[in-house]
Amino acid sequence: MKKDNANFSPAGKKTSVRWFIVFMLFVVTSINYADRATLSIAGDAVQQDLGLDSVAMGYVFSAFGWAYVIAQLPGGWLLDRFGSKTIIALSIFFWSFFTLLQGAIGFFSAGTAIILLFTLRFLVGISEAPSFPGNGRVVASWFPSAERGTASAFFNSAQYFAIVIFSPLMGWLTHSFGWHSVFVVMGVGGILLTFVWLKTVYEPKKHPKVNQAELEYIEKGGGLISMDDSREESKQKKESKWPYIKQLLTNRMLIGVYIAQYCITTLTYFFLTWFPVYLVQARGMSILEAGFVASMPALCGFAGGVLGGIVSDFLLKKGRSLTLARKVPIIIGMLLSCSMIICNYTESAWLVVVIMSLAFFGKGFGALGWAVVSDTSPKECAGLSGSLFNTFGNIASITTPIIIGYIVNATGSFNGALVFVGANAIAAILSYLLLVGPIKRVVLKKQEQNPDQSLPV
């Protein structure tokens, strides 16, 4: 195996470029989730300024989710067609640009502002769609199986890190300069990040800093370093990957993983949308306090996210099966997440923070879905496979804010909402125990088509 780039580091002690790549995924994912959370931090102020009730606010929260789900499969196709680097760069730029524009909606009347806010959140959702499938695709190409859990957990834990770092910042911006400033600051930061990504991230065989020893280590451990070679071959053959969707959707293991991801994402979107509002409206905190308090459970989620990946890979290195190594942290994490229901039985604000921190830790510890995707995705359509997984998972980004909005509006309380979210954690456990079975890479049947009958690409 020869490296394509003539300027690569010579063979010898293997380099560690793959860990810088996952660090860049971590940074991008932090901005990704911070931009998703902008509306939740500014939510109470926006709700008051625009005169929205809980149901209307739930629909505004869901705008991102509708677009994110709709755009998943096209996003995966783009990744497999044009590669991770280019598509993720475009994704970062456009979601940041549409976030920036949300800072201007205050110049319009309330009715127009609501329509514009929904539309811009919708466009942010479309723009972010390729990001996580792209992350999974990058990890599958840059990491051997024994390090994939840690790598996936590291970039996935950025969702909690984003809240730890950016919730206090956004709470302070809202308190000091108004909610519009949140969107402006986050939008500009993301646009700048686009150019950093383009200068630092490459495919494994094209990276100027990687050496032959690292490439061989990755490939021998199951890393798909030639993933984009098959992409070039597909482009030359004009091979359509859409027929593979049927095979993915009839695989019992993947269906179980998809259902579980929907349930786990329900927890994610409770924290990303209604949790700060819950702290303000149900626990009597100010927006500034909610911004800082929301960062405490998120810090525990970050720790849980990193630890879950480390534990999973530790089990693998100790000779445990891939199935056990992935399922054990997921099941333990979801059991801990159920603890949030206890918040319904206490009036103590500090105890609520402790319980939510435990639940958030569990959610992070069990969030190994992207490691499972990297373990199971076929080489021929890794981007499409990740997008299908993300499509199912992020249906929860639509349903969760709306369902919670209706529960709060009907009951005048968040108690039912916490039970709803906790029940989804139980459902995720049952899916991994009863449906998923052994975790292994899916081998697709090759499509035998007459060129004249092939689907358009």
Image (tube, rainbow, N blue to C red):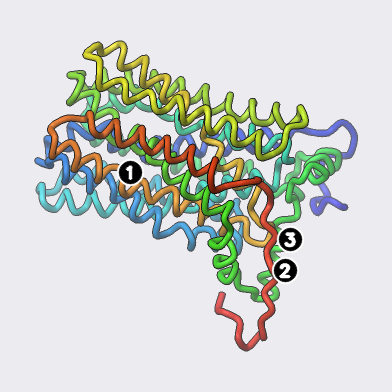
Total marks in image = 3
Crowd around label 1: few <14 · some 14–19 · many ≥20 (10 Å): many
- Earlier-in-chain disc, 2 versus 1: 1
Taking depth in this image into account, of 387 and 203 the one nearest to the observer is 387
Residue 43's quadrant in the figure? top left
Q: CA distance from mark 1 to mark 3?
A: 37 Å
Q: With respect to residue 149, does 125 lie above or below?
A: below
**Residue 409 in picture, x, y percent from top left:** 14, 39
Camera sees residue 185: no
Taking depth in this image into account, of 200 and 79 the one nearest to the observer is 79
Crowd around label 2: few <14 · some 14–19 · many ≥20 (10 Å): few
Helix, strand or loop status at disc 2: helix
Q: Answer left or right for 61 relative to 136.
A: left
Taking depth in this image into account, of 390 and 3 the one nearest to the observer is 390
Seen from this angle, which residue lies furthest right?
12
Q: CA distance from mark 2 to mark 1?
A: 38 Å
Q: Answer left or right for 92 relative to 81.
A: left
**Residue 35 in picture, x, y percent from top left:** 37, 39
Camera sees residue 113: yes
Q: CA distance from mark 2 to mark 3?
A: 6 Å
- Residue 100 marker: 1
- Residue visible at 20% across and 20% down? 283
Identify residue type, mark 1. Answer: Leu
- Residue 233 marker: 2
- Residue visible at 52% across and 35% down? 367
